[in-house]
Image (cartoon, coloured by chain):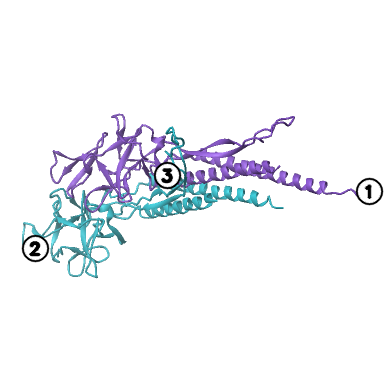
């Protein structure tokens, strides 16, 4: 009889984790370049009793176990901002970012410049081009980022010739779901997952930002489902508890004849 | 339950978002105002099962781990330094910069500040000042009897003095630019200060070497776009509501747990 309670408890713990994931998705509804998480559960079978000579064989009990959170790598909607340093990635690609902890990858294309004229993320980490960070000069105007990531500018009063300032490094992964979220809209590549240069089908869009890919309706539905299931299991556990109390009371009723 | 705090971080972020949007809308008609944008990032993750962990001696690895995020944080509210529309006013001392650059303004405490608001006036001594009475640098003095004041695209201020038919040059407006103009610090009154993030100021003449040119009789409007602000406001409001819903859902779950105890 304890088993029913433990099975219910295992489900409730898993539901709490799922709500944590849903809450994080909803909290990041307006985070640029955010990728939603999903949760996968699996059944965990407990071994049956070793003595198997009962008339009806003991059945195995299955618990719920949260196996994984998976990354929903679908594209978010693009918001046009018109900012010259805003880029959105059309396709499965990432911008490479140089951080203190090593190379990281992001889809948050709200870039800016630092005091040295280098292109940086909102956290101030340098965005990498094919030959290291990309540096713009103070007199550069009309920054144009082409679909393949090449950055060209008009330098000073030169109104006819473009100067090239480098090319943004766009990388892609054979299995992007293996990437690890690090916070700050950054993804880390675990050992054995190597970035490759993105194929030409991955294109940059200047003047747009990729919003979060969290679908609010889906998250709300998941949340309702989680709360309802949780409540149902609570009711089930309460029934179990009542049943056991009744059993204890009735069994301990010593007949006084 | 972690979801409570995660949702609270989401509500706090959206509250800040609404605050930034409302400031943009409030300054929709402010000359030289540059709109701000709240930027968010996800907070750190707790790895309950790390992705890529080896699960067997045969080298099988976990294709996906369990990562629980802790919510959202605001990274910054950078300014979007795009050009605002120019509004024709016809006033002699209204000047707008078309392109890169800021006017230099001397504050009463002798600090130099920078502005895109070119609605200048003359003070009692005939010097060019901002609407708040701060001196425009370098100082340009307009004689009392000067007529037909002209400011050309290169920033030269000239006027016709009595007894003369040719215009006399009174001074030269200079402008300043920064590598990262979004890194300037706003101090109100349409003024900005230099910061370590903006890079050092580079002074120059309008229309020279990539600087913008100066337009007399025009003012630069705020670069706030009503449509995008309102749609951002709706998005922020809905996101706030949904985070509130998560909190009530968590509350309901906790309640049903505590009801177990009878």
Which dot, 1 or 2, sits closer to the camera?
A: 1
Q: Chain of mark 3?
A: B
Does the image show residue A75?
Answer: no
Residues at badges 2 and 3 in contact (C-beta under 8 Å)?
no
Q: Chain of mark 2?
A: B
In the image, which lettered chain appears purple? A
In the displayed image of the protein, which residue is found farthest to the right? Answer: A257
Q: Residue at x 21, y 69 (%)?
A: B110
Instruction: Measuring from the top left, give residue A157's x and y in whole percent.
Output: 13, 45
Dot 2: element: loop
Q: Which mark is residue A257?
A: 1
Q: Residue at x 78, y 48 (%)?
A: A248
Instruction: Measuring from the top left, give residue B29's x and y in whole percent.
Output: 34, 53
Query: Do marks 3 and 1 share a chain?
Result: no
Q: Which residue is mark 3?
A: B231
Query: Relative to residue A239, is residue B47 drawn left or right?
Result: left
Q: Color of chain B here? A: cyan
Depicted B174 relative to depicted A162: above or below: below
Dot 1: element: loop
């Amino acid at each position: 009889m304890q088993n029913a309670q433990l099975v219910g408890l295992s489900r409730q713990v898993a539901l709490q984790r799922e709500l944590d994931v849903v809450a994080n998705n909803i909290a990041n509804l307006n985070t640029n370049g955010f990728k939603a998480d999903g949760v996968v559960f699996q059944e965990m079978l407990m071994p049956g009793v070793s003595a198997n000579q009962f008339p009806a064989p003991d059945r195995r009990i299955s618990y719920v176990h949260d196996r994984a959170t998976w990354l929903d790598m679908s594209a978010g909607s693009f918001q046009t901002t018109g900012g010259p340093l805003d880029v959105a990635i059309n396709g499965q690609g990432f911008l490479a970012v140089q951080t203190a902890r090593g190379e990281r990858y992001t889809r948050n294309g709200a870039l800016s410049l630092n005091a040295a004229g280098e292109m940086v993320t909102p956290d101030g980490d340098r965005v990498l081009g094919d030959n290291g960070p990309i540096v713009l000069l103070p007199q550069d105007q009309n920054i144009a980022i082409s679909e393949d990531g090449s950055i060209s500018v008009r330098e000073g009063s030169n109104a006819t010739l473009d100067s090239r300032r480098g090319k943004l490094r766009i990388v892609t992964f054979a299995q992007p779901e293996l990437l690890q979220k690090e916070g700050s809209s950054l993804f880390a590549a675990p050992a054995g997952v190597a970035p490759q240069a993105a194929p030409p089908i991955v294109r940059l869009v200047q003047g747009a930002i990729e919003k979060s890919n969290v679908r609010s309706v889906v998250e709300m539905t998941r949340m309702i489902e989680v709360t309802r299931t949780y409540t149902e299991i609570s009711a089930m556990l309460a029934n179990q508890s009542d049943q056991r109390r009744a059993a204890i009371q009735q069994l301990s009723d010593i007949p006084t004849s | 339950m972690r979801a409570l705090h995660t949702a609270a971080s989401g509500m706090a972020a959206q509250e800040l978002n609404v605050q930034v949007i409302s400031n943009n809308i409030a300054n929709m008609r402010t000359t030289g105002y540059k709109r701000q944008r709240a930027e968010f990032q996800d907070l750190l993750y707790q790895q309950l099962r790390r992705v890529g962990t080896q699960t067997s001696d045969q080298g099988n690895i976990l294709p996906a781990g369990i990562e629980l995020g802790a919510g959202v944080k605001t990274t910054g509210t950078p300014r979007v330094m795009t050009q605002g529309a120019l509004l024709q006013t016809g006033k002699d001392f209204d000047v707008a910069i078309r392109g890169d650059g800021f006017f230099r303004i001397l504050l009463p405490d002798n600090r130099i500040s920078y502005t895109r608001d070119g609605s200048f006036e003359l003070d009692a001594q005939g010097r060019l000042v901002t609407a708040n009475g701060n001196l425009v640098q370098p100082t340009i003095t307009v004689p009392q009897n000067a007529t037909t004041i002209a400011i050309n695209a290169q920033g030269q201020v000239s006027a016709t003095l009595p007894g003369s038919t040719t215009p006399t040059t009174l001074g030269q407006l200079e402008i300043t630019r920064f590598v990262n103009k979004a890194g300037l610090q706003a101090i109100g009154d349409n003024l900005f200060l230099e910061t370590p993030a903006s890079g050092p100021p580079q002074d120059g003449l309008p229309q020279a070497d990539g600087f913008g040119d100066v337009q007399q009789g025009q003012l630069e409007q705020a670069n706030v776009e009503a449509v995008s602000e309102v749609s951002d406001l709706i998005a922020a409001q809905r996101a706030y509501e949904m985070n509130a819903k998560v909190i009530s859902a968590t509350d309901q779950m906790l309640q049903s747990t505590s009801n177990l105890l009878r």
